[in-house]
């Protein structure tokens, strides 16, 4: 149990002792400033208001009932009815001792109820190379996945790649022609982006080619062998490209996590017939539509979700319905999380609604769309190349590594080449990821090389550097006793110790709200507390017992930083 939960138990007990209605929220938060104690109970004012009684008097009553003797040395009523709790340094030290026993978890418990969580993220369209538009889903989803797993949940990654749309007809037609005219397909497909562009150009300009392309889609979807072989060749290359990007980006998605749109093809007719049996379908201009009153437009008309076109073709929403049903019945998910662009919000809302109405999912299954905003250029418009084209993800990542390389070479020219390159890779990728993860996911943000690569402020290089600094202290420390007793005499030691103990709370926020920025903020504050501690509390010059204790605290900080960054998909290094 973390400190917040422990206090919550005590405060709830005190709440019922003074006969507050059951389920009165306790609202316990870490205090913003040390003179308000370590934790603050904010729930009393709300309760007093409901009961029309004096909040301060109520707070006093509660404090009298509050049995915190073992953990706190002062509990006081402040302001209009806050309760401030000052924890005992000795108790904090004892908790930390406990946490230090397992340096892989630093006291973080696994969740009480283990859930099966399906996480749908990345999901690029395989017709083209991955571009910057795929960055956010891939890295935010991956951070949340890692945190959920760390907390002991069963996570099933689902990379819902687009491999089945009309675009593939055009690509197959172009492959077919290229092959016939004797050019080496493998060579041509090495550059997926130009292959796509060539196909698209022909599709737009050549009517015969366009007709052939449309025929190929039908052939593909009806299982034509030769067509399928060409398509498979294309898909394999495209997936290999995705794997390379995930590897460079340190995103944990594997080939086995790919569950493509095409996998649901056989189930699509059943989706339609089942919707029909449920009486949910309306035939409208030849198409099959589910009208959703819940998503009324401004004019008051129900939202029409098309699930089958008049030519019999299925849509993006049809495969999403099939996917959801699979996630319920085969994967047995308790919670399904979609890390998908905010612009697809209506699409997902309608899919969730239809699946619920049709009984494709259970009522208890949690369905969450976790939208994110757009990555913007300096001009405040969606991030583009100078010429206005989409930026390939590999190009962006290569540039990040190059910029980090220049920085490292400048700061530390004596490092050998191989180490410089490794550091550049870790720092460059981390900078891009952290700049994104540290923002509130739901808003747009402006991409800025200089601020993300800065060694000051809430950035990846700052945190990676903080980690190396602690390492260098250990290098200089010489002999020390790693089993020394922790003593938290100074306020700065207590603050740092408490922060380490709050790691689990930060992770729980991330798991609940799917907001990795909560973890970023936590790690940044942890490093800042460390710096304050380091300035106020000399380590190497202290007497042996104090030195050992402080080194232990520094070690716990480093371990927490390392685990926390790893959960964000960010690597650390011993020196930089
Ligand atoms: N392939 C889609 C796109 O590029 C994203 C897939 C998101 N996941 C889903 N189940 N719809 O927009």
Image (cartoon, grey):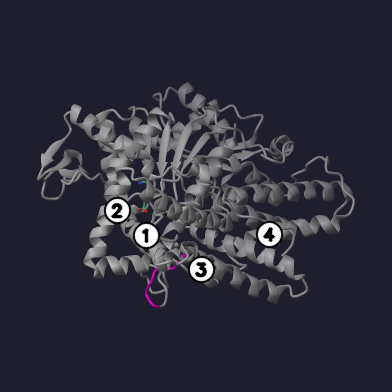
What separation in Å lies between label 2 and label 4 (alpha carbons)? 56 Å
Along the line of sight, the residue nearer the viewer: 427 or 48: 427
Q: Earlier in the sequence, mark 3 or mark 2?
A: 2
Image: magenta residue range: 387-392
Q: Earlier in the sequence, mark 2 or mark 4?
A: 2
Q: Residues within 10 Å of mark 1 (few under 14, many from 20)?
A: some
Question: Would you place residue 187 above or below residue 119 in this image?
Answer: below
Q: Closer to the camera: disc 4 or disc 1? A: 1
Question: Would you place residue 540 above or below residue 118 in this image?
Answer: below
The answer to whether residue 8 shows anywhere in this view is: yes
Mark 1 residue's CB less than 8 Å from ligand 1: no
Q: Position of residue 265 (x, y in %)?
A: 33, 40
Q: Earlier in the sequence, mark 3 or mark 1?
A: 1
Report the disc number at residue 572.
Answer: none
Query: Is 388 covered by the magenta stretch?
Result: yes
Q: Are marks 1 and 2 in contact (CB under 8 Å)?
A: yes
Q: Closer to the camera: disc 2 or disc 4? A: 2
Report the disc number at residue 395.
Answer: 3
Along the line of sight, the residue nearer the viewer: 298 or 457: 298
Report the disc number at residue 216.
Answer: 2
Q: Position of residue 238 (x, y in %)?
A: 46, 56
Q: Position of residue 74 (x, y in %)?
A: 62, 37
Q: Closer to the camera: disc 3 or disc 2? A: 2
The residue singled out by tag 4 in the image is 466
Along the line of sight, the residue nearer the viewer: 398 or 499: 398
Mark 2 residue's CB less than 8 Å from ligand 1: no
Q: Quadrant of residue 244?
A: bottom right
Element marked by disc 2? helix
């Amino acid at each position: 149990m973390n400190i917040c939960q422990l206090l919550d138990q005590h405060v709830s007990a005190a709440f019922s002792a003074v006969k507050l209605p059951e389920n009165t929220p306790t609202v316990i938060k870490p205090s913003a400033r040390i003179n308000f104690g370590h934790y603050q109970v904010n729930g009393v004012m709300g309760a007093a208001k409901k009961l029309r009684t004096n909040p301060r008097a109520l707070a006093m009553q509660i404090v009298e009932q509050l049995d915190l003797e073992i953990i706190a040395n002062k509990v006081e009523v402040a302001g209009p009815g806050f309760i401030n709790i000052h924890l005992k340094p000795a108790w904090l030290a004892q908790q930390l001792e406990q946490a230090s026993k397992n340096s892989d978890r630093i006291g973080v418990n696994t969740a009480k109820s283990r859930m099966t969580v399906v996480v749908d993220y990345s999901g690029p369209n395989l017709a083209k190379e991955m571009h910057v538009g795929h960055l956010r889903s891939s890295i935010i989803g991956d951070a949340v996945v890692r945190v959920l797993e760390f907390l002991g949940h069963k996570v099933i990654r689902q990379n819902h790649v687009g491999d089945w749309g009309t675009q593939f007809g055009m690509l197959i037609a172009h492959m077919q022609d290229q092959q016939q005219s004797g050019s080496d397909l493998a060579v041509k497909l090495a550059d997926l982006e130009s292959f796509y562009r060539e196909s698209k150009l022909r599709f737009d300009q050549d009517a015969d080619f366009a007709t052939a392309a449309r025929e190929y889609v039908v052939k593909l979807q009806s299982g034509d062998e030769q067509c399928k072989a060409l398509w498979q060749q294309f898909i394999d290359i495209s997936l290999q490209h995705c794997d390379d990007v995930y590897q460079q980006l340190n995103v944990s998605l594997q080939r086995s996590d790919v569950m493509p749109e095409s996998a649901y093809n056989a189930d699509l007719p059943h989706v339609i017939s089942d919707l029909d049996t449920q009486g949910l379908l309306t035939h409208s201009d030849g198409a099959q539509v589910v009208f959703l009153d819940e998503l009324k437009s401004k004019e008051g008309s129900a939202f029409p979700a098309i699930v089958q076109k008049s030519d019999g073709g299925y849509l993006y929403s049809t495969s999403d319905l099939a996917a959801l049903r699979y996630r319920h019945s085969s994967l047995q998910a308790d919670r399904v999380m979609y890390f998908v662009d905010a612009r697809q919000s209506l699409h997902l809302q309608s899919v969730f609604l239809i699946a619920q109405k049709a009984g494709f999912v259970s009522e208890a299954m949690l369905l969450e769309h976790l939208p994110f905003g757009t990555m913007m250029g300096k001009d405040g418009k969606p991030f583009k190349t100078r010429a206005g084209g989409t930026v390939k993800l590999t190009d962006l990542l290569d540039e990040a590594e190059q910029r980090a390389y220049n920085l490292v070479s400048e700061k530390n020219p004596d490092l050998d080449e191989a180490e410089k390159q490794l550091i550049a890779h870790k720092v460059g990728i981390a900078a891009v990821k952290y700049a994104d993860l540290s923002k509130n996911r739901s808003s747009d943000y402006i991409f800025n090389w200089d601020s993300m690569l800065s060694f000051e402020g809430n950035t990846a290089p700052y945190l990676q550097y903080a980690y190396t600094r602690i390492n260098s202290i250990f290098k200089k420390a010489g002999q020390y006793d790693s089993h020394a007793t922790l003593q938290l005499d100074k306020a700065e030691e207590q603050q740092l110790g408490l922060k380490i103990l709050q790691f689990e709370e930060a992770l729980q926020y991330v798991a609940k709200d799917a907001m990795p920025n909560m973890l970023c903020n936590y790690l940044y504050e942890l490093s800042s507390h460390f710096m304050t501690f380091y300035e106020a509390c000399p380590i190497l010059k202290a007497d042996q017992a104090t030195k050992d204790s402080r080194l232990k605290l520094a070690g716990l900080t480093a371990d927490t930083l390392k685990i926390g960054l790893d959960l964000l998909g960010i690597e650390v290094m011993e020196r930089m």
